[in-house]
Every structure is written in structure tokens, then in C-alpha cells.
Image (tube, rainbow, N blue to C red):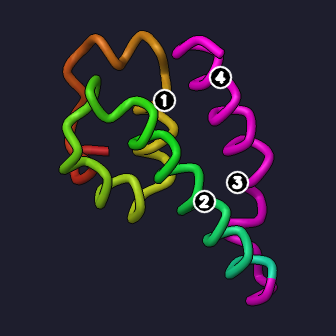
Amino acid sequence: MTSIESIYEIEADLHDLQPYLHSKSARASKRAQGKYKQLVDRYFREHGRMVNPERRSDCLDNDKYFFNLLDPISTTEVIPSAKEL
């Protein structure tokens, strides 16, 4: 799998997971948070050389920030900090 294919796969999984991240059901939200953390870990394990590893904590705290980071065009541009989003 190429780097871009991997990013698209992670992005698709995140897109499917997003409704559950902010679910009113505590059980669904907690399970989604666990899967979300796995996606973030996978991204930084596979693509950590392209992105500052310090952004991992920003990604764990802010799913919108992570979604923006996954954009293949943005990986070559300067990405604003999570606080700016």
C-alpha cells in the first residue's frame, strides 16, 4: 500500500467513525475514542517522518485537526496549530 492509499484509508475510517466520537451514548463514544486513538497511532507510525510527532497530542485532542492533517495536500503545507482551528 502506498503512502497516499494509507492516508485515504485512515481518512475513510475516520469519516465513518466521526458520528460516534460525539455520540450521546457513553459506550459508543468510549469505543469510538479507542478506535480513534488507534487511527492516530497508525498515522504517526506510518507517516511520522512527514509530520512533526509533537502534533500527535493535538490530534488526540481534536478530531477536526486530525482530519485536516490527513488531507494529502496539507501534508506538504504548513498546518496551523490545533488552537487556531
Q: CA distance from mark 1 to mark 3?
A: 14 Å
Amino acid type, label 3: Gln
Number of dots carrying numbers: 4
Q: CA distance from mark 4 to mark 2?
A: 15 Å
The reply to whether callout 3 and callout 4 are in contact (CB within 8 Å) is no
Image disc number at residue 70: 1
Q: Secondary structure at mark 3?
A: helix
Q: CA distance from mark 3 to mark 4?
A: 15 Å
Q: Residues within 10 Å of mark 4 (few under 14, many from 20)?
A: some
Q: Which residue is mark 2?
A: 36
The residue at 50%/53% (across/down) is: 63
Q: CA distance from mark 2 to mark 1?
A: 13 Å
Q: Which residue is mark 3?
A: 18
Amino acid type, label 1: Leu
Q: Secondary structure at mark 2?
A: helix
Q: Along the polypeptide, which appears first: circle 3 or circle 4? A: 4
Q: Along the polypeptide, which appears first: circle 4 or circle 1? A: 4
Q: Along the polypeptide, which appears first: circle 1 or circle 3? A: 3
Q: Along the polypeptide, which appears first: circle 4 or circle 2? A: 4
Secondary structure mostly taken by the magenta-highlighted segment of the chain: helix
Q: Nearer the viewer, mark 1 or mark 3?
A: 1
Residue 44 vs residue 69, the one in the foreground = 44
Quadrant location of the N terminus?
A: top right
Amino acid type, label 4: Tyr
Q: Along the polypeptide, which appears first: circle 2 or circle 1? A: 2
Q: Which residue is mark 4?
A: 8
Give, as a single range, the part of the protein colored magenta: 1-27
Image height of 38 relative to 14, above or below: below
Residue 14 figure quarter: top right
